[in-house]
Image (cartoon, rainbow, N blue to C red):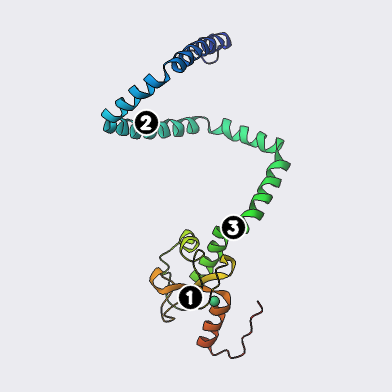
């Protein structure tokens, strides 16, 4: 098969379509039977199929990588032209996406995680954090403040239970901004800390 020969490709596509249509007809009229056989086969060959899929996936990714390597320049040029042609759209889309993302739980969790990291390092605990942003989303934003009924994830964060230690899963509790401030204020001796809700 020569993919650069248009006639050959056209002929191939025609044959493919014909075969596809006749298969489709056959499938539709024997559907129940086929599905039953398929299921039986899958049941019997479970392990084999698993193995085959694994193999297929790894080969496929190898092929894809080889293709990408071989067509690097071509792909680069294609992407460049595509970008030039759709520049405005792409930028608008990205801006919109960034705007939406920055409002998301994950983005807020990422920002908080960075703050906690800096805080721990500044306090001399080093980089001890053993959780990631997803953990904050799943284990802090879904909970209630440990000191009140606040459940709005926009206001929740991690409060360290033992302030002589850094931010670790074992040492943080969900805490609203207000109570975090109060607790930290007590710790650092601020008496007149106010918080506007
Ligand atoms: Zn609270």
| Dot 3 beta carbon under 8 Å from ligand 1 | no
Q: Give the alpha-carbon distance from disc 3 to disc 2, as whole Å.
A: 36 Å
CB under 8 Å between discs 3 and 1: no
Label 3 vs label 2, nearer the camera: 3
For disc 3, the marked residue is: 104
Q: Nearer the viewer, residue 159 or 79?
A: 159
- Badge 2 density bin: few <14, some 14–19, many ≥20, Cα 10 Å: few
Q: In this figure, which residue is indicated by the disc labeled 1?
A: 146
Please identify the quarter of the rendering in which residue 104 is found: bottom right
Name the secondary structure under disc 3: loop
Identify whether 110 is placed above or below 57.
Answer: below
The residue labelled by disc 2 is: 56
Whether disc 1's CB lies below 8 Å from ligand 1 is answered yes
Q: Earlier in the sequence, mark 3 or mark 1?
A: 3
Q: Secondary structure at mark 2?
A: helix
Location of the C terminus by quadrant is bottom right
* Horizontal and vertical percent position of residue 39: 33, 27
Measured as percent of width and height from the top left, residue 57 is found at 39, 34
Q: Quadrant of ligand 1?
A: bottom right
Asked where in the image residue 86 lies, by quadrant, the reply is top right
User: Sequence order check: which comes first, mark 3 or mark 2?
Assistant: 2
């Amino acid at each position: 098969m020569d993919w650069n020969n248009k006639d050959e490709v056209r002929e191939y596509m025609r044959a493919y379509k014909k075969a596809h249509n006749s298969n489709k007809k056959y499938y539709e009229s024997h559907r129940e039977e086929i599905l039953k056989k398929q299921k039986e086969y899958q049941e019997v060959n479970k392990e084999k199929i698993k193995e085959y899929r694994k193999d297929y996936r790894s080969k496929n990714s190898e092929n894809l990588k080889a293709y990408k390597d071989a067509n690097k320049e071509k792909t680069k040029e294609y992407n460049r032209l595509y970008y030039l042609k759709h520049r405005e759209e792409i930028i608008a889309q990205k801006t919109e996406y960034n705007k939406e993302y920055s409002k998301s739980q994950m983005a807020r969790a990422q920002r908080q995680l960075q703050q906690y990291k800096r805080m721990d390092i500044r306090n001399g605990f080093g980089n001890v954090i053993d959780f990631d942003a997803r953990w904050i989303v799943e284990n802090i934003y879904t909970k209630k403040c440990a000191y009140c009924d606040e459940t709005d994830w926009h206001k929740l964060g991690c409060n360290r239970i033992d302030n002589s230690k850094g931010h670790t899963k074992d040492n943080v509790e969900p805490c609203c901004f207000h109570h975090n401030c109060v607790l930290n204020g007590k710790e650092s001796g601020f008496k007149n800390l106010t918080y506007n809700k």
